[in-house]
Image (cartoon, rainbow, N blue to C red):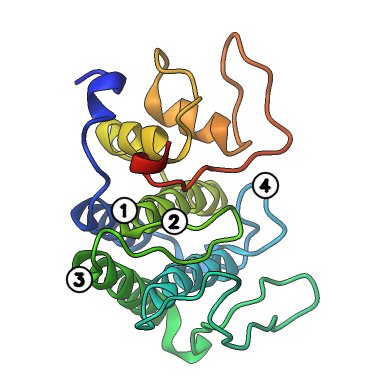
Amino acid sequence: MSRSAEAESPVTAEDLDQAVQFAVAALREAPLEGWDQKAGPLEWTCWETVEHLSDDLFAYAVQLGPRNPPMSGEVPFLWESQRPGGPENAIHTDRSAGPDGLLQVLEASGALLVAMVRTTPRHVMAHHVFGASDPEGFAAMGTVETVVHMRDVAEGLGLTWTPPADLCSRVLERLFPDAPGDTDPWTTLLWATGRAELPGHARLTTWRWDGTPRSQR
């Protein structure tokens, strides 16, 4: 399917679930000694980055939770870092539970967002720092967070990570509609999030996605 054809295919709860399950399966192969290594270009460890990803998915889910979702800020959970320079999360994993516990936290946080995307009416909007969005937008955001942060973690852990091209195409069309449409979807998504070179295009040093609902573009 072409990138333009993918534009007609919404990002779904099933897409997000696929991304999370693919990530969990990949992380089960991680070496035990690798979790305190830096996650790719980030200043966080691989463990901290998976906690951050879990926190992202949780945070997106709770934005859609209230009967009247917030439009001017985030649901006011307390976000805090466990060390100077570490990610500020509301979600932290009990380190004594080990990597299996960390992956349970990731899977559970993903399941919360999957459930909220499935059950929230399509017209509902909620705040995001890059602009208010609808359930499809939050599904796309959660998918991007998952596949891109997994690339960071995979680099730190020495794992191979390549998400499905059709999944990358759908989130590009939903959140990065101005991204090149004739290039490899995964490489293009990495380029759009400032993580890779893309032939013929300047590398991005700043970036943001556009969560505007399709009907409002």
Please indicate whether residue 28 sits to the left or right of residue 31 in the image.
left
Q: In the rendered image, which residue does mark 3 sit on?
A: 119
Q: Is residue 127 left or right of residue 81?
A: left
Q: Quadrant of the N terminus?
A: top left
Are there few (<14), some (14-19), or many (20+) residues within 10 Å of tag 4? Answer: few
Question: Where is residue 26, by image quadrant?
Answer: bottom left
Where 207 falls versus 55 (above or below)?
Answer: above
Image quarter for residue 105?
bottom left
Determine whether label 2 and label 1 are within 8 Å by CB.
Answer: yes
Q: Is residue 78 visible?
A: yes
Marks 3,4: beta carbons within 8 A: no
143 versus 8 height, above or below: below
**What amino acid type should be assigned to the residue bearing mark 3?**
Thr
**Cα distance, mark 2 to mark 1?**
8 Å
Expressed as whole percent of the image width and height from the top left, the position of residue 174 reads 38, 39
Q: What residue is drawn where x is 68% and y is 30%?
A: 204
Secondary structure beneath dot 1 equals helix
Indicate which disc, 1 or 4, sits on the residue closer to the N terminus: 4
- Say if mark 2 contacts mark 3, CB within 8 Å: no
Q: Secondary structure at mark 3?
A: helix
Tell me whether circle 1 and circle 4 mark residues in contact (CB < 8 Å).
Answer: no
- Reading the image, the residue beneath label 2 is 133
Q: Residues within 10 Å of mark 1 (few under 14, many from 20)?
A: many
Q: Which residue is mark 4?
A: 41
Of pointers 3 and 4, the one earlier in the residue sequence: 4
User: Which mark's residue is nearer the viewer, 4 or 2?
Assistant: 2
**Amino acid type, callout 4:** Pro
Residue 37 screen position, x and y as percent: 63, 61
Q: Which residue is mark 1?
A: 136
